[in-house]
Amino acid sequence: MPRRYAIFAGFLLSLFGAAQPLQAQITKPILDTKIVFAKDGSATVSYNTFGAPTQDAETSKIESALVFYAYTMNKLDETKRKELMGEVQAAVSKLATDKGLVRADIVKNVPLIRPLAQEPSKEGISIKFGEMAGKEHSMDIQPPDGGGLPMDAAVLYYFQDLTKGLSSSGLRLMTLSMGGINKWYREKGQASDPNSVSQAPAYALNLAVDIIEKLSGKSATK
């Protein structure tokens, strides 16, 4: 599964206002994700992988979840950013234990997950992940602001669903990347910077690959 992630060069065109709609730019759809909320604040996640092989689909799901996290962090105010970042870091601690990786319930008793004020739209949040000319990846999120749905909670439910469904190697890559993206926020840059939506996930994934390669006894390829 490990691979390098210098793939986000054209990413911001679609997230922050391209001259043309996203669908006109994408040459290959990779993954569509839908997060649908219930009135009690719980959410279900579903995917269209377009027939991709299991390993490729897993990697795309991890990439998509990380970029959605970075996108959400960019949209939130400072207080909510700190809260979401803290919950993601707490999830890492639940998943990576002294006894190894655990498929933990990372949304249980999380304060930011609460009943919704009104009946949510059945459309939910749509996350379309695709490839543009030149191999850059792009994402379209609808509604862009969540349409009144809690995007911070959606991030946690996305990671939770992957926790249940990924292979062991996929879970390891995701967990390392979750820790890596928070490291970027602490040490490398600011979530308020639009460039963080591409830079933070790329950093996290490359850091995770480096760790996996070192643990497997391979020298990292630069």
Image: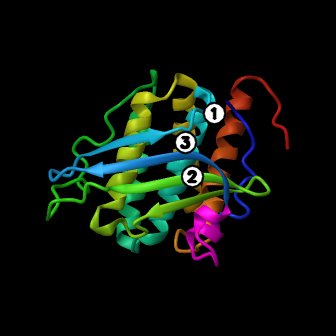
Q: In terms of depth relative to the viewer, which is nearer, 39 or 220?
A: 39
In 3D space, how far apart are the residues under numbered discs 1 and 3 (Cα atoms)?
10 Å
Q: In terms of depth relative to the viewer, which is nearer, 43 or 30?
A: 30
Looking at the image, residue 179 sits to the left or right of residue 160; the answer is right
Residue ID at (30%, 50%): 36
Residue ID at (37%, 57%): 125
| Residue kind at label 3, given as amino acid type | Ile
Residue ID at (55%, 61%): 185
Crowdedness near tag 2: few (<14), some (14–19) or many (≥20) residues, C-alpha within 10 Å: many
In this rendering, the label closer to the viewer, 1 or 3? 1
In this rendering, the label closer to the viewer, 3 or 2? 2
N-terminal-most mark, 3 or 2: 3
Crowdedness near tag 1: few (<14), some (14–19) or many (≥20) residues, C-alpha within 10 Å: few
Determine which residue is flagged by label 2. 129
Q: Quadrant of the image for the N terminus? A: top right
Look at the numbered disc 3 and give the secondary structure of its residue: helix
Rendered position, 107 above or below 141:
above
In the rendered structure, are the residues bearing label 3 and label 2 in contact, judged by CB atoms less than 8 Å apart?
A: no
Q: Is residue 24 magenta?
A: yes
- Residues rendered magenta in the picture: 12-25
Instruction: Indicate the position of residue 175 as horizontal and vertical percent values.
Output: 51, 38
N-terminal-most mark, 1 or 2: 1
Look at the numbered disc 2 and give the secondary structure of its residue: strand
N-terminal-most mark, 1 or 3: 1
In 3D space, how far apart are the residues under numbered discs 1 and 2 (Cα atoms)?
13 Å
Instruction: Indicate the position of residue 73 as horizontal and vertical percent values.
Output: 46, 64
Q: Quadrant of the image for the C terminus? A: top right
Determine which residue is flagged by label 3. 62
| Residue kind at label 1, given as amino acid type | Asp
Determine which residue is flagged by label 1. 56
Res. 182 in view: no
